[in-house]
């Protein structure tokens, strides 16, 4: 039977989908790219914002139109919406099975039961079974996602993730390193360590395991070119981690450090465990010790009670730090969270939108100014993929997208590109050296 997984949301969902497809492939299921070609479609969902849920129900509607047109289709729901809504999803005629975020190791059993006609919901904790040896059907042949810690213990007042992903649970260090070494032997040049709060890695293991130690050991793995990690939490970003990044040749000079707000009053209401000043001090420490580093962030506008002064504090923080990338979102109430229970969503939508647009314009100007400094410089990228017949793209160790023309396919290879044009988004250039193909 043919199976298609449509993945919503974060990179951890992408990695979960790779694991599910890998496990299903060992049982003879055939992955396909188009749901219209599939016998089974799994929607691996995200619930972080209402917009993500709306996309899921929209996709479910599309699949139903296929069914009504005569397509025989078994539909399953995995990921955060599966965990949030639970067994109630089985009350829908179109949903045959539901798989919790920690139950992905049971995917073959659940799909098999669904194929036999049973309606199935599984919320077992199978994370201990997700080891380096579990087959994964990777999307890329040169870059791999490696989840090292599941869940989150922070309970930010706006966030549904601790309720859908559970408490923090780290993978053993030796198991992660085995996966990294296996990937390197198979020709992977880049890896990204993943976690809802990746800086907490190892704290629950009761030994000396830490993200800093993992990065240091992975840096010694022959064949790897770059090591990334996502997503960090400011108050867990240790001095040891900063030192490791500064002294590790392969760790990318790109750090994603969500701030969410520049107002201490809003940070407290969000249950973020740091102040504006503590966040700024961390930024200066990183820049002083690591040097030329790209820092990106997440910001929520329109959190309940956010005044114009609170927003101005956020605006000024972005002006001061000059992030190289900012992921912006309007506050979205999530049922079951502290903010949903106790705070009124009292910032009008038009005010939220105006604040979002103001930050977008600011960040666009900052990005354009930073990117202009690359003009005429040669940067090293790893080719990631093809845009059209001759244009390819890759990214620098500071996570800058670079677009260039090439007569040969440089995907997965090192390329030195001289930058000839800059925008507020990608950089454009001409390759001056392409690593020889090993084929």
Image: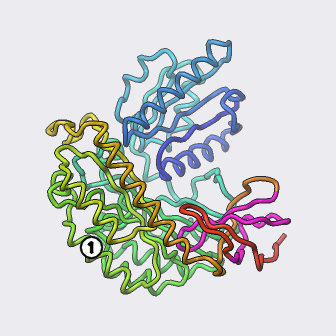
Q: Is residue 383 visible?
A: yes
Q: Which residue is mark 1?
A: 280
Residue 161 in picture, x, y percent from top left:
33, 46
**In the structure shown, which secondary structural element does the residue marked by tag 1 occupy?**
helix
Asked if the stretch drawn in magenta spans residue 391, the answer is yes
Q: Magenta segment, which residues?
A: 390-418
Quadrant of residue 250 within the rendered picture: bottom right
Along the viewing direction, whichever of 251 and 15 lies nearer the viewer: 251
User: What colour scheme was applied to this rendering of the protein?
Assistant: rainbow
Q: Is residue 138 above or below residue 202?
A: above
Q: Is residue 257 above or below residue 374?
A: above
Residue 303 in picture, x, y percent from top left:
24, 46
Q: Is 426 situated left or right of 118 in this image?
A: right
Q: Is residue 182 visible?
A: no
The residue lying at 60 percent from left, 45 percent from top is: 23
The residue lying at 58 percent from left, 23 percent from top is: 62
Asked if the stretch drawn in magenta spans residue 211, the answer is no
Q: Is 84 situated left or right of 421 in this image?
A: left
């Amino acid at each position: 039977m043919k199976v298609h997984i449509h993945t919503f949301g974060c990179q951890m969902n992408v990695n979960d989908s790779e694991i599910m497809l890998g496990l299903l492939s060992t049982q003879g299921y055939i992955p396909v790219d188009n749901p219209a070609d599939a016998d089974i479609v799994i929607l691996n969902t995200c619930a972080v914002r209402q917009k993500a849920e709306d996309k899921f129900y929209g996709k479910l509607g599309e699949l139903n139109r296929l069914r009504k047109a005569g397509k025989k289709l078994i539909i399953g729901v995995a990921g955060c919406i599966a965990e949030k809504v639970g067994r109630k999803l089985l009350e829908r005629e179109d949903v045959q099975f539901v798989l919790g975020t920690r139950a992905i190791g049971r995917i073959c059993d659940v799909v098999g039961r669904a194929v036999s006609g049973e309606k199935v919901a599984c919320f077992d904790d199978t994370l201990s079974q997700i080891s380096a040896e579990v087959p994964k059907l990777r999307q890329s042949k040169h870059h791999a996602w490696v989840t090292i810690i599941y869940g989150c213990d922070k309970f930010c007042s706006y966030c549904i993730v601790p309720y859908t992903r559970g408490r923090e649970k780290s993978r053993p260090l030796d198991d992660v390193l085995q996966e990294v070494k296996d990937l390197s032997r198979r020709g992977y040049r880049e890896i990204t360590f993943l976690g809802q709060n990746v800086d907490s890695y190892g704290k629950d293991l009761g030994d000396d395991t830490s993200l800093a130690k993992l990065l240091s050991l992975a840096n010694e793995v022959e064949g790897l070119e770059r090591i990334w990690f996502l997503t960090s939490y400011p108050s867990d970003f240790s001095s040891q981690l900063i030192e490791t990044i500064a002294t590790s040749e392969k760790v990318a000079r790109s750090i994603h450090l969500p701030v969410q707000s520049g107002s201490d009053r809003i940070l407290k209401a969000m249950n973020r465990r740091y102040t504006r000043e503590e966040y700024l001090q961390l930024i200066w420490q990183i820049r002083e010790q690591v040097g030329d580093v790209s820092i990106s962030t997440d910001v929520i506008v329109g959190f309940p009670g956010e005044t114009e002064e609170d927003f101005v504090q956020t605006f000024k923080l972005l002006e001061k730090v000059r992030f190289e990338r900012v992921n912006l979102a309007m506050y979205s109430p999530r049922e079951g969270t502290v903010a949903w229970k106790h705070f009124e969503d009292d910032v009008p939508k038009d005010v939220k939108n105006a604040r979002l647009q103001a930050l977008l314009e600011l960040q666009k100007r900052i990005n354009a100014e930073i990117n202009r400094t690359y003009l005429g410089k040669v940067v090293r990228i790893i080719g990631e993929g093809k845009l059209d017949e001759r244009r390819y793209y890759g990214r620098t160790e500071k996570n800058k997208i670079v677009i260039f023309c090439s007569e040969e396919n440089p995907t997965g290879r090192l390329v030195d590109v001289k930058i000839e044009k800059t925008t507020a988004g990608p950089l454009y250039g001409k390759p001056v050296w392409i690593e020889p193909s090993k084929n």
